[in-house]
Amino acid sequence: MSEKTILVWFRNDLRVHDNEILFEATRKADKVLPVYIFDPFYFKTAALGLLKTGNIRAKFLLESVADLRGNLQKLGGDLIIRIGNPAEIIPQLAQQYEVSEVYHHREVAFEETQISEEVEAALWKIKLNLKHFIGHTLYHKEDLPFPIKDIPDSFSIFKKKVERDSQVRPCIETPEHIYTPEIVDAGNIPTLAELGLTGPVDDPRSDFHYEGGESTGLLHLEQYISRQSLTGATKGNKHSDHPSRLSAWISLGCLSMRWVYREVTHGSHNSGSPLVLELLWRDYFRFMFKKHGKQFYSAERFKDNDDPAANQEELFDKWKVGNTGVPLVDASMRHLNATGYIPNDNRQAVAVYLAHELKVDWRKGAAYFEEKLIDYSPASNLGNWAFVAGVEHDPKDTRYFLSPKQLSDLDLQAQYISTWLPEAFAEQV
């Protein structure tokens, strides 16, 4: 009897812990073929002359894929790495290694969904099935207290009902061993130059070092929990002195949201944790994509109280480089450009300023964040920008965001601004 081989297509799930497609493949098949593909689509220059993936996030991605390969090798397996179109490469590998089925985690954003559909169509031509799993949310969609079509558009109502009526599923076991076919050519991890990018420069002003991969993600999660325990972080204190900084690992799936939830809550339903709140927002925006699709972000759903600026390109260029004349906005944008990260409150501030003060099309800001953010996630990025831009929502939802007036207080932001925009204080010296 011939052996059954399942190809596991990794995308934004770069881990071996709590990974359903990997665990199920080891259970259902004799051999598992793990594959990661660097799709040129994500490294092209898109609208506005912006990259879809900037060099800071690309470096983090390369490190994450390298760590995934290492962790698979520790389990006896390996990771095939290719550069190209998944719809061409996956069927080729499937035929080469006599694959019986292909597993992957379902995405919700339109570009990612289209790529999945193209792969699925290509596999159908060779009579193979692409099996979809749900592995990017805290709450499984089958456990929600409402069908997808009836999910509340209000985050406040969504949060209340989900926390009251749903449970987070236990984490999936980590495979004890992975058996792969004899791999002829596992492939090399590309360099930034091969992806058309230059290497980022470490900025000495940064107070945090990012290194991609499941191993460092788990370590930083452990350190975050230790800091919270030592400082006795107040339940429900959104503006903790110790932000988790885990979003980059969560966005690439180096950390499972369920794993983070389990470690932070220790089995309790600690909905007051700022990190749990972040996970809930991620779920909410993903489910909004699932419910509305592209229509959720269409112009018809936006309030259009402001006339757009006539000189949008000029204003957008000043905003990008941090040259608007507003200290917090300029400091935040320079911080983003240098490190790929700014705190969530600052993201809200710069988004509100671009969309409502400068009256520049919010989609330009969303595209710029897509290039620059080390923790970019399609649903969260578009969801946050849409919220700021004026998608109708429950007024109660605004309590989760600081107002622009609060964020522009120089006294509150003095240390931050002096670090990233020292000239703002030069006249005071």
Image: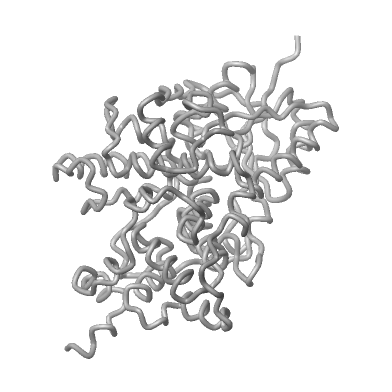
Residue extending furthest toward the bottom? 427
Q: Does 207 sit left or right of 60 as displayed?
A: left
* Residue 219 seen in render: no
Residue located at (49% from left, 42% from top): 153
- Give the x, y percent position of residue 198: 55, 68
Above-or-below relation of 99 to 381: above
Quadrant showing the N terminus: top right
The residue shown at (21%, 54%) is 241
Q: Is residue 226 left or right of residue 110?
A: left
Q: Which scheme is used to colour this image of the protein?
A: one colour
Q: Is residue 44 left or right of residue 337?
A: right
Q: Quadrant of the C terminus?
A: bottom left
Given the current orientation, which residue lies at the most extreme front position?
305
Quarter residue 122 falls in: top right
Which quadrant of the structure image shows residue 93? top right
Please tell me which residue lies in front, 233 or 148.
148
38 lies left or right of 407? right
Task: Work out whether 171 lies above or below 209.
Answer: above
187 or 288: nearer the viewer: 288
Choose between 128 and 262: the one closer to the eye.
262
Q: Position of residue 203 (x, y in %)?
A: 36, 70
Q: Percent x, y for residue 370?
A: 54, 60
